[in-house]
Amino acid sequence: MPRWFYQLASPRWCYQITGKLLPGFAIAAGLLILFGTVWGLAFAPPDYQQGNSFRIIYLHVPTAYMAQSIYMTMALAGAIGLIWKMKVADMVAKSCAPIGASLAVLALATGAIWGKPTWGSWWVWDARLTSMLILLFLYLGIMALNSAIESESTAAQSTAVLALVGLVNIPIIKYSVDWWNTLHQPATFKITEKPAMPPDMWIPLLILVIGFYCFFAVVLMMRLRNEIIRRERRSGWVRELLMQQRG
Amino acid sequence: MNAQRKQRLTLVLIIVFGSSLAVALVAYALSQNINLFYSPSQISMGEAPADTRIRAGGIVVEGSIRRDPESLKVQFDITDYAHSTTVEYVGILPDLFREGQGIVAQGQLDHQGRLIASEVLAKHDENYMSPEIAEALAAAGQMPHMPATAGKDY
């Protein structure tokens, strides 16, 4: 294992490095989201069938991608915590859950708002929508389980196992539109093909997706730093830090 | 990696693959129930149950829409390019409903194999384009399922 991997295990080193990375990611997230939103909502052309109502894609797709990416991050961090008994990985996993849950709620809400004018229904129990709802319930279950167990390490272990079991839902969400008949349309973006959308529609979407990844990094680092300070409050370096800040 | 970590890694892999296998088997067993709708081919082969509410999905056949001048009653055919099913519906259709558009209708099959729908939902595909590009493609004959009525003014 490389040295940086073991350095990550040190809460103090993590606290310092995230402190340095935070401002850059915050600025990038702010600029990308602002730029992408203005481009997508004001300057991208309307769709030939849906008109302007398709523009909610600029919020729906990034939030739905993030809800799934954050879940994978959380499960990976949980697995690292299980295998290497790394406290920082447990803290990352714990910090991911509320962020992912809120983005899953946003993806479901924007999807419903989009569904009403285009499909004619707020909600349909098709495979894509249902598996996405299950993702939200997994997040909520993981958060509830984590707060129900008093011992930090036992809580981290149990939630990591639950997160790993729930990981099977991710490919189901992704491929639900290909495996079954659904009302939700198949993916517009595929790795092997050109996007089924002109560049002046997908470039702002790409900018927003990258912006949302940066936003996730910012919120994750902020939550992680809080968690580190809370758990390490009795250690020497945290006391020193707090003394310095009180000045 | 020491022996204990290797053991825990194996455990993690067993959890992931075990749960995937279990869910895959369940999904395979339920595959027909997970489908949101039956296709016209499935209906014509008698795979869809009569006397119960089902959903049927397909493309609205061009020139098949017949509106009743006195009421909101409308009749149209949906197809999957192999078979087609006639749908009857009374009510307001969604904005995206038009010839050549994919739709999902919920209702009951009658004795002649027609679907008496209580709800019609429009399904849209994964292709997005600006109205200008759509017009150019339609003019060049590159959009085979492009309906003649789609040139809505935006």
Image (tube, rainbow, N blue to C red):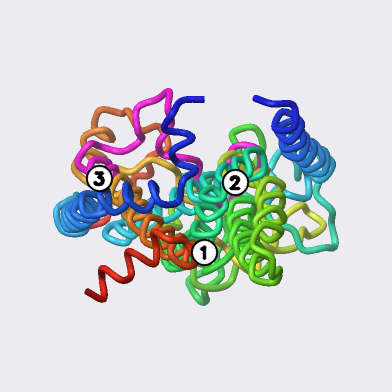
Going from N to C along the chain, the mark reached first, 1 or 3, is 3
Going from N to C along the chain, the mark reached first, 2 or 1, is 2
The three-letter amino acid code for the residue at tag 3 is Ile
Give the CA distance from mark 3 to mark 2: 26 Å
Q: Does the segment drawn in magenta span residue A247?
A: no
Instruction: Point out the image quarter for the C terminus of chain A.
Output: bottom left
Q: Which residues make up the magenta segment?
A: A177-206
- Looking at the image, residue A79 sits to the left or right of residue A4; the answer is right
The three-letter amino acid code for the residue at tag 2 is Ala
**Which marked residue is nearer to the observer: mark 3 or mark 2?**
2
* Residue drawn 56% across the image and 50% down it: A87
Q: Secondary structure at mark 2?
A: helix
At label 2, counting other C-alpha atoms closer than 10 Å, the crowd grade (few under 14, some 14-19, many 20 or more) is many
Chain of the residue that carries numbered disc 2 in the rendered image: A
- Please tell me the numbered disc located at residue A231: 1
Q: Position of residue B13 (x, y in %)?
A: 72, 33
Nearest the eye: B46 or A146: A146
The answer, for residue B154, to whether it is visible in the render is: no
**Which marked residue is nearer to the observer: mark 2 or mark 1?**
1
Chain of the residue that carries numbered disc 1 in the rendered image: A
Q: Looking at the image, is A102 positioned above or below residue B137?
A: below
- Looking at the image, residue B141 sits to the left or right of residue A82; the answer is left
Q: Mark 3 highlights which residue?
A: A207
Q: Looking at the image, is B12 positioned above or below residue A33?
A: above
Give the CA distance from mark 1 to mark 3: 36 Å
- Please tell me the numbered disc located at residue B80: none
Chain of the residue that carries numbered disc 3 in the rendered image: A
